[in-house]
Image (cartoon, helix red, strand yellow):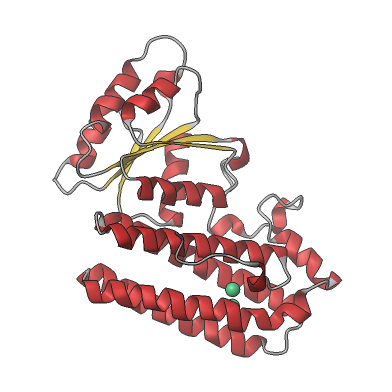
């Protein structure tokens, strides 16, 4: 069961901000699922970074909507965002420094009591100003990733525009379902046209016979012996253009030289976990454009 369930009572009367909050709830649930398994500290770090990246991006979007609807408590609300930002930065810092259970408990507590409280109690306060407000419509349109006014889209700082994401098909391979879901959530933020997820390299390889993605994202986990043979086999496929599909290898392996062996096998680009939204997209663009 999910840690937090989205309900209509959380609606602030603005579709873009509601959508943001739904994404945040989903990312919190993924982080919770990751803490529950205790199997993979690096994936937990990726889930945390992803949530922080999206939350900070969301705060600035929400502030733009509040300004547009002349919300009288704007200044106070902005200060609350600043306070939450400081708190999350402090928890993240301690998490990455210490990696202890106390920080994990504190993290869950923070997410549930502070972030959700903020959405349910403070954000809801601007509902009467945002709902059915024609002045807010323009700014709402500009906040949508598929906006018809591309120069007004402000997703550029989070999602690079150099790739046409809604015409892109991406295949994810990872033995960790949680990590695979984190990547899928990041791709959904960019409205990626098609996302396929496989937990076994062989199944992913087989799917290539009928389906050619624009990018393969491989989450290389500690116990995964299939990544290197998968990339080598891919590069040896004769005929057609399958062998040339870019592969972004995201390595959670501790041993030295892991990334180098991925590149030697034929990975297009290789980064280490933990990732976040910005680091992921930067690497994905590099792999696609190489
Ligand atoms: Fe919010
Ligand atoms: Fe807020």
Pick out the residue farthest to the top. Answer: 239
Residue appearing at x 65%, y 53% in the figure: 145
Is 64 displayed left or right of 21 in the figure? Answer: right
> At which x and y percent is residue 3?
45, 65
Is 159 displayed left or right of 251 in the figure? Answer: right
Is 251 situated above or below 65?
above
Question: Image quarter for residue 204?
Answer: top left
Can I make out residue 69 in this image? no
The C terminus: image quadrant: top left
Question: Image quarter for residue 50?
Answer: bottom left
Q: Quadrant of ligand 1?
A: bottom right
Near-viewer residue (220 or 25): 25
> At which x and y percent is residue 29?
45, 62
Pick out the residue farthest to the front. Answer: 1
Is 77 situated above or below 266?
below
Is 106 situated above or below 4?
below
> At which x and y percent is residue 22?
58, 62
Near-viewer residue (16 or 124): 124
Is 212 displayed left or right of 283 in the figure? Answer: right
> At which x and y percent is residue 106?
32, 78
Question: Image quarter for residue 52?
Answer: bottom left
Residue appearing at x 75%, y 66% in the figure: 139
Pick out the residue farthest to the right. Answer: 134
């Amino acid at each position: 069961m999910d840690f937090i369930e989205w309900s209509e009572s959380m609606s602030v009367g603005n579709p873009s901000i509601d959508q943001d909050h739904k994404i945040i709830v989903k990312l919190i649930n993924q982080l919770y699922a990751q803490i529950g398994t205790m199997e993979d500290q690096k994936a937990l770090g990726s889930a945390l970074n992803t949530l922080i990246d999206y939350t900070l991006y969301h705060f600035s979007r929400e502030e733009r909507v509040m300004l547009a609807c002349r919300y009288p408590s704007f200044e106070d609300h902005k200060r609350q965002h600043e306070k939450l930002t400081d708190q999350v930065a402090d928890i993240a810092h301690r998490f990455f420094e210490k990696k202890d259970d106390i920080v994990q408990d504190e993290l869950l507590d923070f997410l549930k009591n502070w972030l959700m409280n903020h959405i349910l109690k403070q954000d809801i306060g601007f509902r009467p100003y945002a709902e059915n407000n024609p002045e807010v419509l323009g700014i709402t349109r500009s906040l949508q990733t598929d906006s018809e006014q591309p120069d007004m889209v402000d997703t550029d700082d989070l999602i690079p525009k150099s790739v046409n994401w809604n015409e892109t098909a991406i295949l994810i391979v990872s033995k960790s379902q949680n990590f695979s879901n984190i990547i899928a959530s990041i791709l959904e933020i960019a409205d990626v046209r098609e996302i396929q997820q496989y937990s076994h390299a062989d199944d992913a390889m087989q799917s290539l016979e009928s389906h050619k993605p624009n990018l393969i994202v491989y989450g290389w986990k500690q116990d995964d012996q299939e990544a290197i043979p998968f990339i080598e086999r891919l590069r040896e496929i004769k005929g057609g253009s399958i062998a040339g599909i870019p592969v972004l290898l995201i390595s959670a392996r501790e041993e030295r030289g892991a990334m180098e062996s991925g590149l030697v096998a034929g990975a297009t680009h290789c980064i280490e976990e933990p990732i976040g939204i910005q680091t992921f997209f930067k690497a994905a663009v590099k792999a696609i454009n190489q």
